[in-house]
Amino acid sequence: MQHQRLFFDGPAGRLQALYAPGQAGRPAVVICHPHPLHGGTMRNKVVYWMARAFEDRGCPVLRFNFRGVEQSEGAWGEGAGETQDAAAALDWMQAQHPDAPLWLAGFSFGCYAGLSAARANAQVSRLFAVAPAVNLYDFSFLDDEKRHLTIVQGDADDIVPAQEVMNWAASHPRSVMHVIAGAGHFFSDHMSEMTHALTAQAFSSS
């Protein structure tokens, strides 16, 4: 898969990104990386394999660095700023693929920022959350969410407790929860299970 290295305009300056153009008509996917202050970047291994899972299905995929990460301009925005960055990424992707379904996926903190942005964008038709940090951030903005939400969680995660994620998922009737036995937060030795769980249902009719 050939990736284009590019920058797009965010609210705090240019944001660095990797973009796979994909095939016409396939869902266009924006992927958000984990916490910038804890080493999170768009090159995170989980984010890379999430992107690969969608790219292998022919999807256009955009992964990007939040403000202040690597070559992205700006500085840490306390979560609210990163939500604005994710909103800008969705706008950029929608402009590139105006006739394609628009999807949002996040990992850990990236779920918080990405899903927060998607909440305000009616064009986003499907949501994906890998190890959503529901124990660290307030996800109540999704309490009345009606869109399909795929959740993938390891039951040996020592950062985001699986039981808390399962309790949260149970309160969302349109969510589908996949628990990966033995997987930690970064899904070491369980990456293929994670990527299959992430995409299998969304593409079951493709």
Image: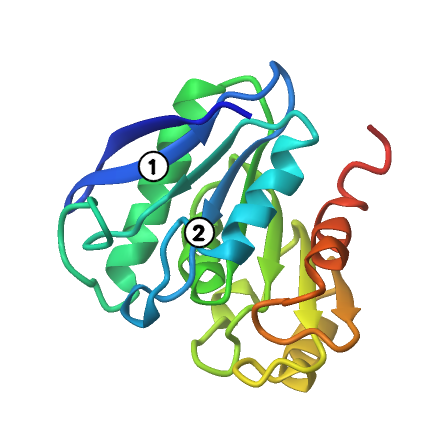
Q: Which comes sooner in the sequence, label 1 or label 2? A: 1
Alpha carbon distance from label 1 to label 2: 11 Å
Instruction: Give the secondary structure at mark 1.
Output: strand
Q: Is residue 120 left or right of residue 187?
A: left
Give the residue drawn at x 40%, y 59%.
Answer: 113
Where does the N terminus fall, quadrant-wise? top right
In x, y percent, where is residue 76?
Answer: 20, 63
Extreme residue in the right direction: 205
Q: Which residue is mark 1?
A: 17
Give the residue drawn at x 52%, y 47%.
Answer: 48
Q: Which mark is residue 165?
A: none
Q: Is residue 106 above or below residue 88?
A: below
Extreme residue in the top direction: 24
Check if mark 1's residue and mark 2's residue have beta carbons within 8 Å.
no
Q: Is residue 82 left or right of residue 109?
A: left
Q: Residues within 10 Å of mark 2 (few under 14, many from 20)?
A: many
In x, y percent, where is residue 44?
Answer: 45, 56
Q: How many marks?
A: 2
Instruction: Give the secondary structure at mark 2.
Output: strand
Q: Residues within 10 Å of mark 1 (few under 14, many from 20)?
A: many
Q: Is residue 168 left or right of residue 81?
A: right
In x, y percent, where is residue 86?
Answer: 36, 47
Answer yes or no: is residue 106 visible. no
Answer yes or no: is residue 10 visible. yes
In x, y percent, where is residue 7?
Answer: 25, 31
Residue type at the position of mark 2: Cys
Q: Which residue is mark 2?
A: 32
Give the residue drawn at x 67%, y 81%.
Answer: 162
Give the residue drawn at x 78%, y 36%.
Answer: 203
Residue type at the position of mark 1: Ala
